[in-house]
Structure formats: structure tokens, C-alpha cells
Amino acid sequence: MLLPQVLNLSEMELSRFNALTPGGHEAITRQVGLLLEDYQVYQQYVQQLRWDRRLRPFLDFSGKIQQLYGAAEFGKTVVAEHLITMGHTPSVMGSTLLPSPSRMQVPAQVQHFDDAVRSILRATRQLLETVRETYMLATQYQDKRTAHLMAQLAQQLGIALTVFSGVRSAAYN
């Protein structure tokens, strides 16, 4: 698991650096850390589907899953780099900043193609909800940089939802 670990900067220094309203830095850092956790779980789940032999005959699906894996890796990297700019280090060690791990709920395995598509849609919606919550918090604390990043990630996830909704529709036509 990736969690943020505090560097030696005070909240006031970080708030001034990020132009946040006082008190916002810790709340946003927690939320961005949670988003990073969700991206980690999401990417691992997509990777699991990517290597599932039962899904390989669906060539269009395999190509889309490969693209989704790349997008998940990109999102995870961007969020981790954003934590670094906030004065934290993504780490595999635990941290007192996050009270709980990822809230993502993904099935252990899927039985067939339809299960895979439904679970991807559900997991992408869950991740999009965490992005939305992060955006709302960043807006509340006037963190324009985080809000802008969340808007870009939401757009990317919206595209993924559209693509996989289309894959599901195409499979039934």
C-alpha cells in the first residue's frame, strides 16, 4: 500500500507553499492519500483482469483493458507526484495521516466477460467518486492545483466509463 509520510515541514509552511486556507493542508493530504490508495487497488485489479486467461478471447476487451491499465498507472503516478509537491513522500510504510486503507471494493475474481465489464464499471465509478470528493475538498480549501488535477483525472475516468459502457453494449448487440 502507498501512504503519504510527512516530511519535516510545518502545516503553516505547507499551507503557504500550496496557497491553501489554514487547516486545509492536512485534510487535503488525507484525501489525496486515500485517492492514491484507491488508485493502487484499482490498478492491481485491472492488472488481475489483464492477465485473466478467460478474458483473452475477447480481443477488443483485452485491448481496452491494456489501455485502462496504462491510464491507472498514469493516474497513480500523477497522484503520487502531487503528494510529493504537497511535501509528503508516497511510501509503502504506514502513516498516521490516513485512518484507513482504500475504500475500493473489487471482487476477488470474475467468472465471465460480463462480470469483468460490470466490475470494471463499478470500480471506475468508485474511483471517480473518490476523485470527486477530493475535488470538492480542494475547492472548499481553495487548493487550485489539486482541484485542477482532480478535474483532469475525472475526465480520464469519464472516458474509461464511456469506453467500457460501449464494450458492454457491443457485446450484447
Image (cartoon, helix red, strand yellow):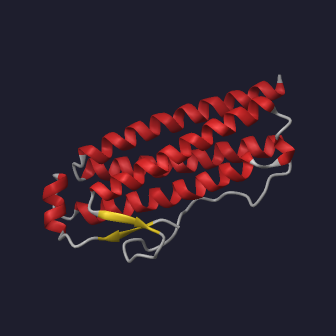
Image location (x, y in percent) of residue 23: 20, 65
Residue 71 x/y as whole percent = 54, 40
Residue lying at the far top in this picture: please name it: 173
Q: Is residue 62 visible?
A: yes
Q: Residue at x 31, y 44 (%)?
A: 147
Closer-to-camera residue (171/1): 1
Query: Can residue 20 be seen by looking at this rendering?
Result: no
Residue 61 in which image quadrant: top right
Instruction: Residue at 46%, 57% (x, y): give it.
Output: 36
Above-or-below relation of 142 to 160: below
Residue 81 pos. (x, y %): 37, 52
> In this rendering, would 106 be left or right of 170?
left
Residue at left 34%, top 57%? 83
* Residue in the image at 64% along x and 59% along y: 105
Observer-nearest residue: 125 or 7? 7
Q: Position of residue 135 (x, y in %)?
A: 36, 47
Residue 60, picture quadrant: top right
Q: Is residue 125 above or below residue 160?
A: below
Picture quarter with the C terminus? top right
- Is 10 left or right of 7, judged from the image as shown? left
- Looking at the rendered structure, the number of numbered marks drawn on it comes to 0
